[in-house]
């Protein structure tokens, strides 16, 4: 048992930050991301002796499935936000763009946010994304197109800003 604990602890120490970034991209805020990751790690720990090979994809799959299950539960019983966080002061154009994108991503429906996370942050194919989300490839393609169009609408000049940033790097 001590060996299992050591392996699991080493995995969390090595990959915890990367997994938290994925959870944040899915959940849209730090607290929800931490909760999502904590639940996924608890599930992975319970099955740790049976996990073979690389554990990270297994934990990511748990993250995606738990997030989708949460959307389904909330759709039946929607949450009502009670307060909004204050705006943070932004310094510089990159920070401004990052804040605009963060707010725009939060405005997307959860499924579109998940598709963008899997396709562009995790760099998965359409087929892999569809398999993880339990939907068809056409759904992934259409949700991706709708999400990108919505981002362009919410952040005017996004294409020009990102092109300019890529040229200056």
Image (tube, helix red, strand yellow):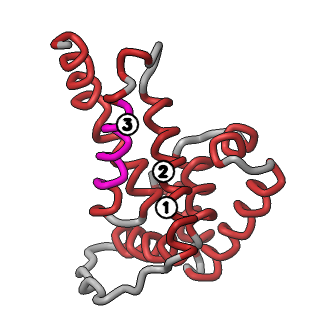
Task: Residue at 29%, 37% (x, y): give it.
Answer: 16
Which residue is disc 1 drawn over? 70
Question: Is the residue marked by circle 3 packed among few (<14), some (14-19), or many (20+) residues within 10 Å?
Answer: few
Residue 39 magenta? yes
Report the Cα–Cα distance between label 1 and label 2. Answer: 6 Å
Image-based side of 141 in relation to 71, left or right: right
The location of residue 68, given as percent across then percent down, is: 55, 56
Residue 1 magenta? no
The location of residue 94, given as percent across then percent down, is: 38, 67
* Residues shaded magenta: 34-44
- Vertical arrangement, residue 100 with respect to residue 117, above or below: below
Front residue (pair 31, 39): 39
Which residue is disc 2 drawn over? 66
- Vertical arrangement, residue 96 with respect to residue 18, above or below: below
Mark found first going from the N terminus, 3 or 2: 3
Specify whether residue 167 is in view.
no
Query: Which of the 4 quarters of the picture holds residue 55?
Result: top left
Image-based side of 144 in relation to 68, left or right: right
Query: Which of the 4 quarters of the picture holds residue 3?
Result: top left
Q: Residue furthest right?
A: 138
Q: Report if the CB atoms under discs 3 and 2 are less than 8 Å apart.
A: yes
Question: Is the residue marked by circle 1 packed among few (<14), some (14-19), or many (20+) residues within 10 Å?
Answer: some
């Amino acid at each position: 048992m001590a060996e299992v604990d050591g392996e699991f602890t080493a995995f969390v120490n090595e990959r915890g930050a990367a997994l938290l970034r994925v959870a944040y991209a899915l959940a849209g805020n730090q607290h929800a991301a931490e909760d999502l990751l904590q639940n996924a790690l608890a599930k992975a720990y319970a099955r740790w002796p049976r996990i073979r090979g690389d554990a990270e994809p297994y934990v990511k799959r748990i993250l995606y499935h738990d997030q989708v299950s949460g959307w389904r539960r909330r759709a039946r019983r929607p949450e009502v936000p009670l307060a909004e966080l204050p705006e943070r002061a932004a310094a510089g154009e990159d920070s401004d763009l990052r804040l605009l994108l963060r707010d725009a991503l939060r405005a997307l429906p959860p499924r579109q946010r998940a598709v963008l996370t899997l396709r562009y942050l995790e760099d998965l194919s359409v087929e892999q994304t569809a398999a993880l989300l339990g939907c068809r490839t056409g759904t992934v393609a259409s949700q991706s197109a709708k999400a990108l169009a919505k981002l362009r609408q919410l952040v005017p000049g996004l294409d020009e800003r990102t092109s300019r940033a890529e040229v200056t790097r």
